[in-house]
Image (tube, rainbow, N blue to C red):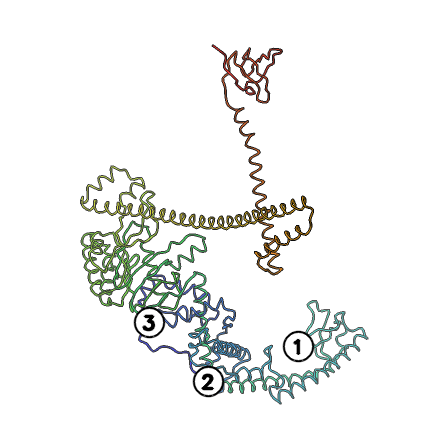
Amino acid sequence: MRCPKVEKIEMKLIAKKTLDDLEYGMVLKQAAARCTTNSGKKQMISTEPFTSFRAVQGALKRTHEYLISFSEEKQIPNHGFEDVSQEISLLSVENSKIEVEGFRRLLVLSETANTMLVFLKKNKDRYPDLFEAANGQLPIKEIPAEIHRIIDKFGEIKDRASDTLHSIRKQMNEVRSKISQSFGSALSTYQGSGFLDEIRETVIGNRRVLAVKSMYRRKVKGVIHGSSKTGSIVYIEPETTLQYTQELQNLLYDEKEEIDAILRVLTDFMRPFETDFTAFSSFLTLIDTHAAKAYYAKDMNAVLPILTESQEIDVKNAYHPLLYLSNKRKKSKTYPQDIHLHPKNRIIVISGPNAGGKSITLKTIGLLQLMLQSGFLIPVHKQSHMGVFEHILTDIGDNQSIENELSTYSYRLKNMKRFLKKCDNKTLFLIDEFGTGSDPELGGAIAEIFLEVFYQRESFGAITTHYSNLKLLANELPHMTNANMQFDAKSLEPTFHLVTGEAGSSFTFEVAEKNGIPYSLINRAKKKIEHGKVRFDASIAKLQKERATMSKTSKELQEVSIKNKKEKEKLETLNAKVKVKLERYQELFDQEQRMIVLGNKVNDAAERYFISNKKRPLIAELLRIVETENAKRKRKSAAEHKKEQKQKKALKEEVAKKVEVVREEKKKIPLQNTTELKRTKITFNIGDKVRMYDGKAVGTIDVLEKKKAIVNYGVFTTQVNVEALELVSRAKS
């Protein structure tokens, strides 16, 4: 049996400071909580990032295979087992003995490993890397078979474990039968004598005893084993059962000795499999860690990015894992970042106001890289590209050392000395607030020199800074670029969105003004510093505002474009439907016209018959008409004909409905016109010739009062509402 394969590579361990700065230990704790076994939890907590491409690739593939198994019909079987380190250590000790509970744990381990190995072999095309992790291990059927031969499913030694044990237990059963018989006889005798209490009997020290009333204890022969709390009952083992009880005790001792011998023989049987048990334990522990990583990946929607042999970090929609899970529990939003580090853009200088997300962006880059190199899937877009770095160096957070009595700046210089020793073209460095802790101008100059050295050594990295000289340097060097954390210039609130290609303003004076600092003080502060620096920062701020406006405009144009595209598609669909409808209506119209022509021919034939009263010419004419029409028809099956008739019927019903709507609309038109005429405001004068809208008689207006008029028709006069009158002619002046 071989242990799981471990690559023989020279490991360049990532510094503990880097792991602490990036909170790598918290990731391990969260992943360890998802382990099933104690050995898996221990191994997870002690996980350190690989620096070998091959090792990283293998670990990632195994975790990814376990993740995709969640959606497979045949899922990976259970891998859980209890710690067997004590049992394995006993196997190496001569004449040692493993207890029954220990064999139960070894049985679970061997059966679980056997099941896993058989499954992976059957499904090696689906899980090739997990199968490879077994490193050629084979199931061992002898181990569970032998344990099952000796121990039953309840954890008891079987009667047939040895001939001697079988004989002893047979004798024990016979003796127990005799004890039962003799005790039953004594119970009946003394119960009849009235010597026993109501409970009659009980068990003390695995021995059946009589519950004798205290006053009759001298009348019952046997051994007293105790009394009740009140002293009213004495518990006596009858004399008739004592002999058999002693015999049973001797047999129990013999049984214990025989079981001890059987377990020693079973332990000796297992000794040659010591390395196999170790291999099984290591293999299942490895599976457990990958399972935990897979469950961890599932919780944060992590994926396997494209792994490249060259050094690069080109990620889209990258989330900080710890922040993402924390916000997920709180149901809060987490902002993703797009980060691009590759040979043509090795270093990014991130600037912008405080509390804008610069530090968390650095930690996102570093923690994702550490997780990737430890075999963890990461929360990024699946088309992201990532390489492997031999060194990951960080300088993040409060670096003041009270213990060593070092200032922040002194500590940072010591850290930079360490950076200079290790920085090369396979190094990733992350520095927060580069150059701070000293005089701004002097600190900025030192920081600029360090940055130039890192650049010359072709290292990869990201720094955050407020120094203008570092921003200018990033703008001058071809493989270095500026980036900024966007800031809403109106609300003066961070957007937590990283934009590459331009430096960011600190918005120092703007933020001060927002927080209620008097403008007069802010203006005095501006006069204290170089005018050019103020103008430089203001220019950057202005550029950021313009970029934000352009981004908003671009987004709006994109939305309009998408809307227009949808409207165009909608119109095209509508036109297609209208075209189909018109074609169907034309077909119906053509058919109706043909029916009219056919009807006219039949009508002409009928008229000729009416005049001549000759049937033969009529029949001949009708037959000719029918044959002519049939010649135009295509032969169709009954089903086709039925379908066609159904379509025609539906079309006619549709047309009939639309025609009915048109008719109803036409009926409304005169009424609408009348209403409009009635609503026309006309100013009437006395003497005007008028008539009512619904009448023919013409009269003359004699009197006008508000909306009423008295109209004289010569024979009679009547009062009418002016809105009901129609002007015929005006009165002559």
Q: Nearer the viewer, mark 3 or mark 1?
A: 3
User: Where is residue 639 drawn, in percent x and y?
Assistant: 61, 59
Mark nearer the N terminus (3 vs 1):
3
Residue at 55% across / 11% down in the picture? 703
For image coordinates 36% across by 61% down, the residue present is 23
Dot 2: within a 10 Å radius of its alpha carbon, few (fewer than 14), some, or many (20 or more) residues?
Answer: few
> Decide: marks 3, 2 in contact (CB < 8 A)?
no
**What residue lies at 60% left-to-right and 88% top-to-bottom?**
162
- Residues 65 and 577: in front is 577
- Residue under pointer 3: 53
**Marks 2 and 1, how far apart in space?**
36 Å
Residue where numbered disc 2 is placed: 93
Mark 1 element type: loop
390 displayed left or right of 607: left
Which picture quadrant has residue 39? bottom left
570 relative to 422, above or below = above
